[in-house]
Amino acid sequence: MNDDQLLRYSRHILLPEIGIEGQQRLCASRAVLIGAGGLGSPIALYLASAGVGRITLCDGDKVDLTNLQRQIVHRTESIGKDKTQSARTTLTSINPEVEVVALTERVAEERIRALAADADVVIDASDNFATRHAINRACVEHRTPLVSGAAVRFDGQVAVFDLRRDDAPCYACLFPEAGENEDMPCAVMGVFAPITGIIGTIQAAEALKLLLGIGELLNGRLLLIDALTMDLRTIRLKKDPACPVCSVR
Ligand SMILES: [Zn+2]
């Protein structure tokens, strides 16, 4: 590490759990982030500022005026531009040391499988069940750890699926693909701006811990947050032995 890097990351390096070795590990890590919206914004900001070496960012949308209330990686002057390019500009201005790969597309099954195969962690900040299940299938197939989050109205949830472990449940153990899970888009339901920041920031923290191999992950646990009451609850998740996605691998 050069002098600038030692200064840039000094407050991480000071932590005995991270140190120079941990920081170098982050700098050599590859993260895939699906979604550059409300959750993806704080996730991308923290991964980039913390020096995660390569961040692959996938989103097919363009920045809209209605996004700016919570999607803090984007700026008013970016309205009409691709979210991935807009985010890339912000991230690179914060930390030019990191490589930001911008994939301007709604991720399809094939693409997400290739991405999961070449990532240390996949972070799901998407907004619909079809994409979440496609991401989960790809992560199960390649045993890539998955950090999953969702937020709508005043409610949010986070879970980690450490699919490197045989006993880890997967997203489909929690929400079966055949289940009656209806998408609840923020455009219809509304969303309290900071809940996306709270959930996204927890996702970023879990992803960084996972890359560093420190602490205890939210693996096999679902954290539920109600921002109206600030009640936090954790539910234990069990691997479903009959799960059609992870029980057959
Ligand atoms: Zn499963």
Image: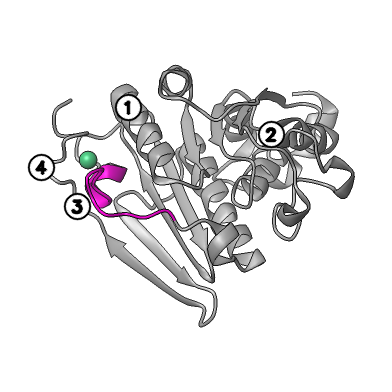
* Residue 169 visible, this orientation: no
Name the N-terminal-most of marks 4 and 1: 1
Q: Residue at x 54, y 71 (%)?
A: 154
Local secondary structure at mark 4: loop
- CA–CA distance in space, label 2 to label 3: 33 Å
The location of residue 108, given as percent across then percent down, is 46, 25
User: Which residue position is annotated with label 1?
Assistant: 143
Is 10 rendered above or below residue 116? Answer: below
Q: Is residue 172 magenta?
A: yes
User: Which residue position is annotated with label 3?
Assistant: 238
* Residue 236 visible, this orientation: yes
Q: Nearer the viewer, mark 1 or mark 2?
A: 1
Secondary structure that dominates the magenta span: loop
Q: Quadrant of the N terminus?
A: top right
User: Which residue position is annotated with label 4?
Assistant: 241
Name the N-terminal-most of marks 3 and 1: 1
Whether the residues at callouts 1 and 2 have beta carbons within 8 Å, the answer is no
The crowd level at tag 3 (other Cα within 10 Å; few <14, some 14-19, many 20+) is some
Q: Is residue 68 left or right of residue 60?
A: right
Name the N-terminal-most of marks 2 and 3: 2
- CA–CA distance in space, label 4 to label 2: 38 Å
Q: Is residue 17 left or right of residue 109?
A: right
Local secondary structure at mark 2: loop
The location of residue 67, given as percent across then percent down, is 71, 53
Q: Quadrant of the C terminus?
A: top left
Name the N-terminal-most of marks 4 and 2: 2
Local secondary structure at mark 1: loop
- CA–CA distance in space, label 1 to label 2: 24 Å
